[in-house]
Amino acid sequence: MSLQSLILVALAAAPSNAFFLMPCWPITTQRLDPLVSPGEISSHVHQIIGGNAFAPTLTYNDTQAEDVCTTCFVKNDHSNYWIPSLYFQNADGSFESVDQVGSTSVYYFNEAARLGPNETMTPFPEGFRMLAGDPDKRTGGTDFADQAINYKCLNYAGSPSDSKGFPNADCPDGVRAEVTFPSCWDGVNLDSDDHKSHVAYPTETYQSGECPSSHPVHLVTLLVEFIWDTHKFAGQWPNADENPFVWSSGDPTGFGLHADFIMGWDYELLSAAVEQCDDEFGVLANCAAFDGLLPPADEIYANPGTCTTKDYVNEDVSGTLSKLPGCNPVDSTGSASTQCNNDASINGTWPGESGGDASSSWAASGAPAGTGLGTDGRHTLTVWDIDTVTVYVTASAPGSSATAASGSQGEWKKREAAAEPEEDEAAIIKREAARVLHGHRQRHGRRSGGLW
Protein backbone atom coordinates (compact mmCIF):
# COMPACT_ATOMS: atom_id res chain seq x y z
CA MET A 1 0.00 0.00 0.00
CA SER A 2 1.34 3.45 -0.89
CA LEU A 3 2.01 6.09 1.74
CA GLN A 4 -0.68 8.31 0.23
CA SER A 5 -3.22 5.50 0.40
CA LEU A 6 -2.25 4.80 3.98
CA ILE A 7 -3.02 8.38 4.96
CA LEU A 8 -6.38 8.39 3.17
CA VAL A 9 -7.62 4.98 4.29
CA ALA A 10 -8.33 4.75 8.04
CA LEU A 11 -8.67 1.49 9.90
CA ALA A 12 -11.63 0.76 12.13
CA ALA A 13 -10.90 1.46 15.79
CA ALA A 14 -9.63 -1.57 17.70
CA PRO A 15 -11.63 -2.96 20.65
CA SER A 16 -10.97 -1.81 24.23
CA ASN A 17 -8.23 -3.53 26.27
CA ALA A 18 -6.61 -4.89 23.13
CA PHE A 19 -2.94 -5.63 22.59
CA PHE A 20 -0.64 -8.41 21.50
CA LEU A 21 2.57 -9.46 23.21
CA MET A 22 5.32 -10.96 21.07
CA PRO A 23 8.47 -12.57 22.48
CA CYS A 24 11.62 -11.85 20.46
CA TRP A 25 15.06 -13.33 21.12
CA PRO A 26 18.38 -11.54 20.54
CA ILE A 27 19.73 -12.00 17.04
CA THR A 28 23.03 -10.16 17.41
CA THR A 29 25.04 -7.88 19.69
CA GLN A 30 27.35 -5.54 17.82
CA ARG A 31 28.25 -1.91 17.19
CA LEU A 32 25.80 -1.21 14.38
CA ASP A 33 22.85 1.15 14.04
CA PRO A 34 21.36 1.33 10.52
CA LEU A 35 18.96 4.03 11.69
CA VAL A 36 21.38 6.57 13.20
CA SER A 37 24.66 5.51 11.52
CA PRO A 38 23.76 3.79 8.24
CA GLY A 39 26.68 2.15 6.45
CA GLU A 40 29.07 2.72 9.33
CA ILE A 41 30.14 1.41 12.70
CA SER A 42 27.87 3.01 15.28
CA SER A 43 29.10 4.91 18.31
CA HIS A 44 28.17 2.18 20.82
CA VAL A 45 27.13 -1.47 21.05
CA HIS A 46 23.50 -2.52 20.71
CA GLN A 47 21.43 -5.55 21.68
CA ILE A 48 19.32 -6.32 18.60
CA ILE A 49 16.25 -8.50 18.19
CA GLY A 50 14.14 -9.42 15.17
CA GLY A 51 14.90 -10.04 11.51
CA ASN A 52 18.21 -11.36 10.21
CA ALA A 53 18.34 -8.76 7.42
CA PHE A 54 19.88 -6.49 10.09
CA ALA A 55 23.06 -5.00 8.61
CA PRO A 56 24.97 -1.69 8.44
CA THR A 57 22.21 -0.41 6.15
CA LEU A 58 18.64 -1.65 6.22
CA THR A 59 15.69 -0.75 4.01
CA TYR A 60 12.13 -2.01 4.07
CA ASN A 61 12.78 -4.00 0.90
CA ASP A 62 15.74 -5.68 2.62
CA THR A 63 13.43 -6.87 5.40
CA GLN A 64 10.98 -8.37 2.91
CA ALA A 65 13.44 -10.59 1.02
CA GLU A 66 12.28 -14.20 0.73
CA ASP A 67 15.17 -15.65 2.72
CA VAL A 68 14.77 -13.36 5.76
CA CYS A 69 13.92 -15.04 9.07
CA THR A 70 13.22 -13.55 12.49
CA THR A 71 13.77 -14.28 16.17
CA CYS A 72 10.29 -12.92 16.91
CA PHE A 73 7.44 -15.38 17.25
CA VAL A 74 5.33 -13.96 14.47
CA LYS A 75 7.44 -15.14 11.59
CA ASN A 76 6.25 -12.42 9.19
CA ASP A 77 7.55 -9.66 11.46
CA HIS A 78 11.01 -8.96 10.08
CA SER A 79 11.31 -5.68 11.99
CA ASN A 80 14.35 -4.89 14.10
CA TYR A 81 14.24 -3.44 17.60
CA TRP A 82 17.34 -2.54 19.62
CA ILE A 83 18.67 -0.81 22.72
CA PRO A 84 22.22 -0.28 24.06
CA SER A 85 24.01 -3.23 25.61
CA LEU A 86 24.61 -3.30 29.36
CA TYR A 87 27.97 -3.64 31.16
CA PHE A 88 29.15 -4.01 34.77
CA GLN A 89 32.13 -1.84 35.75
CA ASN A 90 34.61 -3.58 38.04
CA ALA A 91 36.66 -1.88 40.75
CA ASP A 92 39.75 -2.04 38.50
CA GLY A 93 37.94 -0.10 35.75
CA SER A 94 37.36 -3.08 33.46
CA PHE A 95 33.93 -3.99 32.13
CA GLU A 96 31.94 -7.21 31.93
CA SER A 97 29.03 -7.67 29.56
CA VAL A 98 25.69 -8.38 31.24
CA ASP A 99 23.57 -11.16 29.76
CA GLN A 100 20.00 -10.64 28.68
CA VAL A 101 17.52 -12.88 30.50
CA GLY A 102 15.25 -14.80 28.13
CA SER A 103 13.35 -13.08 25.36
CA THR A 104 12.43 -9.44 24.88
CA SER A 105 8.75 -8.62 25.33
CA VAL A 106 7.44 -6.54 22.43
CA TYR A 107 3.98 -5.08 23.01
CA TYR A 108 1.66 -3.65 20.36
CA PHE A 109 -1.19 -1.77 22.08
CA ASN A 110 -4.15 -1.16 19.81
CA GLU A 111 -7.09 -0.64 22.19
CA ALA A 112 -9.54 2.13 21.37
CA ALA A 113 -9.19 3.56 24.88
CA ARG A 114 -5.81 5.00 23.87
CA LEU A 115 -7.32 7.10 21.09
CA GLY A 116 -8.59 10.65 21.13
CA PRO A 117 -12.00 11.68 19.75
CA ASN A 118 -12.47 10.88 16.06
CA GLU A 119 -9.10 9.07 15.86
CA THR A 120 -8.49 5.63 14.39
CA MET A 121 -5.69 3.19 15.13
CA THR A 122 -3.15 3.03 12.30
CA PRO A 123 -0.42 0.45 11.63
CA PHE A 124 3.15 1.49 10.92
CA PRO A 125 3.58 2.21 7.19
CA GLU A 126 6.14 0.44 5.02
CA GLY A 127 9.55 2.05 5.44
CA PHE A 128 8.71 3.63 8.80
CA ARG A 129 11.43 3.99 11.45
CA MET A 130 11.94 5.92 14.68
CA LEU A 131 14.01 6.46 17.81
CA ALA A 132 12.82 6.90 21.41
CA GLY A 133 15.03 8.28 24.18
CA ASP A 134 18.34 10.15 24.15
CA PRO A 135 21.74 8.43 24.62
CA ASP A 136 23.29 11.69 25.87
CA LYS A 137 20.74 12.30 28.61
CA ARG A 138 22.11 12.04 32.15
CA THR A 139 19.39 13.60 34.31
CA GLY A 140 15.72 12.88 34.79
CA GLY A 141 12.80 14.97 33.59
CA THR A 142 9.03 15.15 33.65
CA ASP A 143 7.96 15.39 30.01
CA PHE A 144 6.37 12.45 28.21
CA ALA A 145 9.64 11.44 26.54
CA ASP A 146 11.16 11.08 30.03
CA GLN A 147 8.13 9.23 31.38
CA ALA A 148 8.35 6.76 28.47
CA ILE A 149 11.66 5.43 29.89
CA ASN A 150 11.40 3.16 32.94
CA TYR A 151 13.24 0.50 34.93
CA LYS A 152 11.79 -2.26 37.08
CA CYS A 153 13.88 -3.84 39.83
CA LEU A 154 12.45 -7.36 39.65
CA ASN A 155 11.76 -9.46 42.73
CA TYR A 156 9.42 -12.34 41.98
CA ALA A 157 9.20 -13.24 45.67
CA GLY A 158 7.92 -9.76 46.45
CA SER A 159 7.00 -6.69 44.44
CA PRO A 160 8.99 -4.91 41.72
CA SER A 161 10.02 -1.30 42.20
CA ASP A 162 10.14 1.36 39.48
CA SER A 163 12.75 4.01 38.78
CA LYS A 164 13.64 6.36 35.93
CA GLY A 165 17.38 5.82 36.30
CA PHE A 166 19.28 2.65 37.15
CA PRO A 167 18.06 1.03 40.40
CA ASN A 168 20.61 1.71 43.12
CA ALA A 169 20.28 -1.70 44.75
CA ASP A 170 20.62 -5.34 43.78
CA CYS A 171 17.53 -6.71 42.02
CA PRO A 172 17.04 -10.43 42.83
CA ASP A 173 15.52 -11.26 39.46
CA GLY A 174 17.28 -8.70 37.31
CA VAL A 175 16.56 -5.25 35.94
CA ARG A 176 13.93 -4.72 33.26
CA ALA A 177 14.54 -1.79 30.92
CA GLU A 178 11.33 -0.47 29.35
CA VAL A 179 10.89 1.98 26.46
CA THR A 180 7.56 3.17 25.07
CA PHE A 181 7.81 4.69 21.59
CA PRO A 182 5.87 7.77 20.41
CA SER A 183 2.53 6.85 18.86
CA CYS A 184 1.62 10.01 16.93
CA TRP A 185 2.93 10.54 13.40
CA ASP A 186 2.98 13.56 11.09
CA GLY A 187 1.45 11.40 8.35
CA VAL A 188 4.10 12.39 5.80
CA ASN A 189 7.67 11.53 6.76
CA LEU A 190 8.78 7.94 7.29
CA ASP A 191 11.87 9.24 9.11
CA SER A 192 13.44 12.57 10.08
CA ASP A 193 16.97 13.89 10.50
CA ASP A 194 16.94 13.24 14.25
CA HIS A 195 14.69 10.17 13.81
CA LYS A 196 12.23 11.75 16.26
CA SER A 197 10.70 14.89 14.76
CA HIS A 198 8.25 12.99 12.54
CA VAL A 199 6.66 11.41 15.63
CA ALA A 200 5.35 12.66 18.98
CA TYR A 201 3.73 11.40 22.15
CA PRO A 202 -0.03 11.90 22.66
CA THR A 203 -1.29 14.92 24.59
CA GLU A 204 -2.91 13.20 27.60
CA THR A 205 -0.20 10.75 28.69
CA TYR A 206 2.89 9.31 27.03
CA GLN A 207 0.82 6.32 25.93
CA SER A 208 -2.74 7.57 25.39
CA GLY A 209 -4.90 10.52 24.44
CA GLU A 210 -5.44 12.67 21.38
CA CYS A 211 -2.50 13.27 19.08
CA PRO A 212 -1.23 16.85 18.63
CA SER A 213 -2.34 18.65 15.47
CA SER A 214 1.26 18.59 14.19
CA HIS A 215 1.24 14.77 14.32
CA PRO A 216 -2.41 13.83 13.71
CA VAL A 217 -2.06 10.14 12.77
CA HIS A 218 -2.46 7.84 15.78
CA LEU A 219 -0.21 4.81 15.42
CA VAL A 220 -0.33 1.56 17.33
CA THR A 221 1.69 2.00 20.56
CA LEU A 222 4.98 0.07 20.70
CA LEU A 223 6.66 -0.93 23.98
CA VAL A 224 9.83 -3.03 24.36
CA GLU A 225 11.08 -4.65 27.57
CA PHE A 226 14.57 -6.15 28.00
CA ILE A 227 15.53 -7.99 31.23
CA TRP A 228 19.20 -8.04 32.27
CA ASP A 229 20.90 -10.51 34.63
CA THR A 230 22.27 -7.90 37.02
CA HIS A 231 21.88 -10.17 40.08
CA LYS A 232 24.85 -12.21 38.84
CA PHE A 233 27.05 -9.34 40.08
CA ALA A 234 25.35 -8.94 43.48
CA GLY A 235 28.49 -9.57 45.52
CA GLN A 236 30.85 -7.61 43.30
CA TRP A 237 29.67 -3.98 43.58
CA PRO A 238 32.76 -1.78 44.17
CA ASN A 239 30.62 0.53 46.33
CA ALA A 240 27.53 -0.91 47.98
CA ASP A 241 25.55 2.32 47.60
CA GLU A 242 26.61 3.27 44.06
CA ASN A 243 25.21 1.66 40.91
CA PRO A 244 28.02 -0.12 38.97
CA PHE A 245 26.11 -0.73 35.73
CA VAL A 246 26.62 1.34 32.60
CA TRP A 247 25.06 1.41 29.16
CA SER A 248 27.40 0.84 26.22
CA SER A 249 27.12 4.57 25.44
CA GLY A 250 29.03 5.34 28.65
CA ASP A 251 25.91 6.25 30.63
CA PRO A 252 26.10 5.24 34.33
CA THR A 253 22.83 7.01 35.25
CA GLY A 254 20.32 5.05 33.16
CA PHE A 255 18.63 8.22 31.93
CA GLY A 256 20.29 7.74 28.52
CA LEU A 257 18.31 4.58 27.75
CA HIS A 258 16.97 4.67 24.19
CA ALA A 259 15.49 2.30 21.63
CA ASP A 260 15.36 2.11 17.84
CA PHE A 261 12.73 0.57 15.58
CA ILE A 262 12.80 -0.19 11.86
CA MET A 263 9.49 -1.45 10.51
CA GLY A 264 9.77 -4.84 8.80
CA TRP A 265 6.27 -6.28 9.08
CA ASP A 266 4.35 -7.58 6.14
CA TYR A 267 2.07 -4.54 5.96
CA GLU A 268 -1.15 -6.43 5.30
CA LEU A 269 -0.47 -8.73 8.25
CA LEU A 270 0.23 -5.85 10.62
CA SER A 271 -2.94 -4.10 9.43
CA ALA A 272 -4.96 -7.24 10.15
CA ALA A 273 -3.35 -7.64 13.58
CA VAL A 274 -4.08 -4.04 14.57
CA GLU A 275 -7.69 -4.51 13.53
CA GLN A 276 -8.30 -8.05 14.82
CA CYS A 277 -6.11 -8.69 17.90
CA ASP A 278 -8.43 -8.01 20.84
CA ASP A 279 -7.24 -10.39 23.56
CA GLU A 280 -7.10 -8.62 26.93
CA PHE A 281 -3.98 -10.63 27.86
CA GLY A 282 -2.21 -10.12 24.53
CA VAL A 283 -2.00 -13.84 23.70
CA LEU A 284 -0.77 -14.26 20.12
CA ALA A 285 -2.63 -17.53 19.59
CA ASN A 286 -5.93 -15.76 20.32
CA CYS A 287 -5.53 -13.45 17.33
CA ALA A 288 -6.86 -14.85 14.05
CA ALA A 289 -4.45 -12.68 12.06
CA PHE A 290 -1.57 -14.90 13.22
CA ASP A 291 -3.11 -18.27 12.32
CA GLY A 292 -0.38 -20.49 10.85
CA LEU A 293 2.38 -17.99 11.68
CA LEU A 294 3.24 -19.08 15.24
CA PRO A 295 5.40 -21.88 16.66
CA PRO A 296 3.73 -24.64 18.71
CA ALA A 297 2.35 -23.43 22.03
CA ASP A 298 4.97 -25.31 24.07
CA GLU A 299 7.75 -23.53 22.16
CA ILE A 300 6.45 -19.99 22.40
CA TYR A 301 9.13 -18.96 24.90
CA ALA A 302 11.87 -21.28 23.65
CA ASN A 303 14.87 -19.71 21.94
CA PRO A 304 14.46 -20.48 18.21
CA GLY A 305 18.24 -20.48 17.76
CA THR A 306 18.14 -21.22 14.03
CA CYS A 307 17.79 -17.61 12.83
CA THR A 308 21.15 -15.83 12.84
CA THR A 309 22.90 -12.95 11.14
CA LYS A 310 26.51 -11.94 10.45
CA ASP A 311 28.90 -10.25 12.84
CA TYR A 312 29.87 -7.27 10.70
CA VAL A 313 32.17 -5.45 13.13
CA ASN A 314 35.53 -7.04 13.94
CA GLU A 315 35.74 -6.33 17.66
CA ASP A 316 35.01 -8.06 20.95
CA VAL A 317 31.92 -6.71 22.70
CA SER A 318 31.30 -9.43 25.30
CA GLY A 319 33.17 -10.95 28.22
CA THR A 320 35.69 -8.87 30.17
CA LEU A 321 36.87 -5.72 28.37
CA SER A 322 39.42 -3.06 29.31
CA LYS A 323 37.10 -0.33 27.98
CA LEU A 324 33.68 0.05 26.45
CA PRO A 325 33.75 -0.62 22.68
CA GLY A 326 34.05 2.58 20.67
CA CYS A 327 34.78 5.98 22.20
CA ASN A 328 32.58 5.82 25.29
CA PRO A 329 34.22 6.91 28.54
CA VAL A 330 31.91 6.47 31.53
CA ASP A 331 30.41 9.91 31.98
CA SER A 332 27.66 11.02 34.35
CA THR A 333 27.34 14.41 32.63
CA GLY A 334 27.09 13.45 28.95
CA SER A 335 29.88 15.85 27.98
CA ALA A 336 33.06 13.75 28.17
CA SER A 337 35.54 13.88 25.28
CA THR A 338 35.18 11.00 22.85
CA GLN A 339 38.63 11.15 21.23
CA CYS A 340 40.22 7.71 21.23
CA ASN A 341 41.77 5.11 18.98
CA ASN A 342 39.20 2.94 17.27
CA ASP A 343 40.57 0.18 15.09
CA ALA A 344 37.31 -1.67 14.44
CA SER A 345 36.05 -2.02 10.87
CA ILE A 346 33.12 -3.51 9.01
CA ASN A 347 33.68 -6.92 7.45
CA GLY A 348 32.15 -8.19 4.23
CA THR A 349 29.14 -7.04 2.27
CA TRP A 350 25.39 -7.19 2.78
CA PRO A 351 22.30 -7.11 0.53
CA GLY A 352 21.64 -3.37 0.92
CA GLU A 353 25.28 -2.30 0.69
CA SER A 354 26.31 0.32 -1.85
CA GLY A 355 29.91 -0.82 -1.97
CA GLY A 356 31.90 -1.53 -5.11
CA ASP A 357 32.17 0.50 -8.29
CA ALA A 358 29.05 2.65 -8.13
CA SER A 359 28.62 3.46 -11.80
CA SER A 360 29.29 -0.05 -13.06
CA SER A 361 27.38 -2.03 -10.42
CA TRP A 362 24.33 0.20 -10.56
CA ALA A 363 24.44 0.43 -14.32
CA ALA A 364 24.35 -3.35 -14.38
CA SER A 365 20.97 -3.18 -12.65
CA GLY A 366 19.65 -0.58 -15.06
CA ALA A 367 20.76 2.59 -13.31
CA PRO A 368 22.39 5.33 -15.38
CA ALA A 369 25.90 6.57 -14.77
CA GLY A 370 26.23 9.36 -12.22
CA THR A 371 24.87 12.80 -12.98
CA GLY A 372 26.56 15.71 -11.19
CA LEU A 373 24.29 17.62 -8.84
CA GLY A 374 26.43 20.35 -7.31
CA THR A 375 29.21 21.23 -4.91
CA ASP A 376 29.73 23.39 -1.82
CA GLY A 377 33.45 23.73 -2.56
CA ARG A 378 34.46 20.69 -0.54
CA HIS A 379 31.97 17.97 -1.46
CA THR A 380 30.47 16.86 -4.73
CA LEU A 381 26.97 15.39 -4.77
CA THR A 382 25.98 12.96 -7.46
CA VAL A 383 22.61 11.46 -8.34
CA TRP A 384 22.99 7.89 -9.57
CA ASP A 385 19.41 6.92 -10.14
CA ILE A 386 15.98 8.33 -9.43
CA ASP A 387 12.40 7.33 -9.95
CA THR A 388 9.21 8.01 -8.01
CA VAL A 389 10.24 5.57 -5.30
CA THR A 390 14.01 5.61 -4.82
CA VAL A 391 16.83 8.10 -5.17
CA TYR A 392 20.52 7.19 -4.97
CA VAL A 393 22.86 10.02 -3.99
CA THR A 394 26.56 10.00 -3.16
CA ALA A 395 28.82 12.51 -1.43
CA SER A 396 32.56 12.55 -2.05
CA ALA A 397 35.36 14.75 -0.71
CA PRO A 398 37.63 16.82 -2.96
CA GLY A 399 40.10 14.82 -4.99
CA SER A 400 38.17 11.58 -4.67
CA SER A 401 35.61 9.95 -6.88
CA ALA A 402 32.69 7.82 -5.80
CA THR A 403 34.46 4.79 -7.25
CA ALA A 404 37.72 5.42 -5.41
CA ALA A 405 36.00 6.36 -2.16
CA SER A 406 33.89 3.22 -2.17
CA GLY A 407 36.85 1.29 -0.84
CA SER A 408 37.26 3.49 2.22
CA GLN A 409 34.15 2.74 4.26
CA GLY A 410 31.43 5.30 4.18
CA GLU A 411 33.03 8.05 2.06
CA TRP A 412 30.00 7.71 -0.13
CA LYS A 413 26.85 5.72 0.23
CA LYS A 414 23.49 4.96 -1.30
CA ARG A 415 20.50 6.80 0.08
CA GLU A 416 17.09 5.21 -0.38
CA ALA A 417 13.89 7.10 0.36
CA ALA A 418 10.22 6.81 -0.46
CA ALA A 419 8.84 9.73 -2.39
CA GLU A 420 6.39 11.82 -0.43
CA PRO A 421 2.91 12.40 -1.89
CA GLU A 422 2.86 15.07 -4.61
CA GLU A 423 6.63 15.56 -4.36
CA ASP A 424 8.42 16.18 -7.65
CA GLU A 425 11.81 14.74 -8.58
CA ALA A 426 13.70 17.97 -7.92
CA ALA A 427 12.36 18.12 -4.38
CA ILE A 428 13.27 14.48 -3.76
CA ILE A 429 16.83 15.05 -4.99
CA LYS A 430 17.23 18.17 -2.87
CA ARG A 431 15.90 16.53 0.28
CA GLU A 432 17.91 13.32 -0.01
CA ALA A 433 21.11 15.03 -1.13
CA ALA A 434 20.93 17.30 1.90
CA ARG A 435 20.59 14.28 4.16
CA VAL A 436 23.53 12.49 2.57
CA LEU A 437 25.70 15.59 2.85
CA HIS A 438 24.67 16.04 6.49
CA GLY A 439 25.72 12.47 7.27
CA HIS A 440 28.97 12.89 5.35
CA ARG A 441 29.87 15.99 7.35
CA GLN A 442 29.02 14.29 10.63
CA ARG A 443 31.44 11.49 9.80
CA HIS A 444 34.24 13.90 8.93
CA GLY A 445 33.61 16.66 11.48
CA ARG A 446 32.38 19.30 9.01
CA ARG A 447 29.51 21.52 10.04
CA SER A 448 29.38 24.27 7.41
CA GLY A 449 26.29 25.29 5.46
CA GLY A 450 24.67 23.16 2.80
CA LEU A 451 24.36 23.44 -0.92
CA TRP A 452 21.08 25.32 -0.88
Image (spheres, helix red, strand yellow):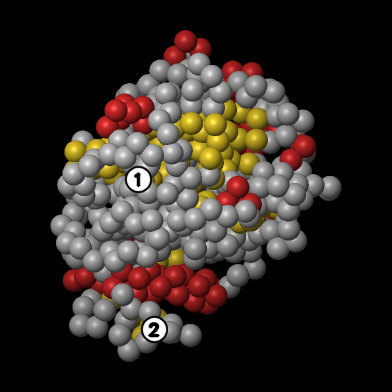
- At x 79%, y 47%, the residue is 116
The amino acid beneath tag 1 is Val
Q: Regarding mark 2 in the picture, which secondary structure is present there?
A: loop
Q: Is residue 330 above or below residue 223?
A: below
Q: Element type at marker 1?
A: strand
The quadrant in which residue 7 appears is bottom right
Q: Is residue 371 visible in the rendered structure shown here?
A: no
Residue at 47% from the left image edge and 50% from the top image edge: 255
In the image, farthest residue toward the right: 117
Q: Quadrant of residue 141?
A: bottom right
Pick whichever of labels 1 and 2 is earlier in the sequence.
1
- Horizontally, residue 25 falls left or right of residue 320, namely right
Q: Is residue 46 left or right of residue 149?
A: left
Q: Position of residue 389 (x, y in %)?
A: 51, 60
Kindly identify which residue carries mark 2.
448
In three-dimensional space, the C-alpha distance between marks 1 and 2, rounded to whole angstroms, equals 34 Å
Q: Residue at x 42, y 49 (%)?
A: 253
Q: Position of residue 68 (x, y in %)?
A: 38, 36
| Disc nearest the viewer among 1 and 2 | 1
Residue, far top: 298
Residue drawn at 66 percent across, 47 percent down: 206
Label 1 sits on residue: 246
Position of 168 with respect to 87 (left or right) is right
Amino acid at circle 2: Ser
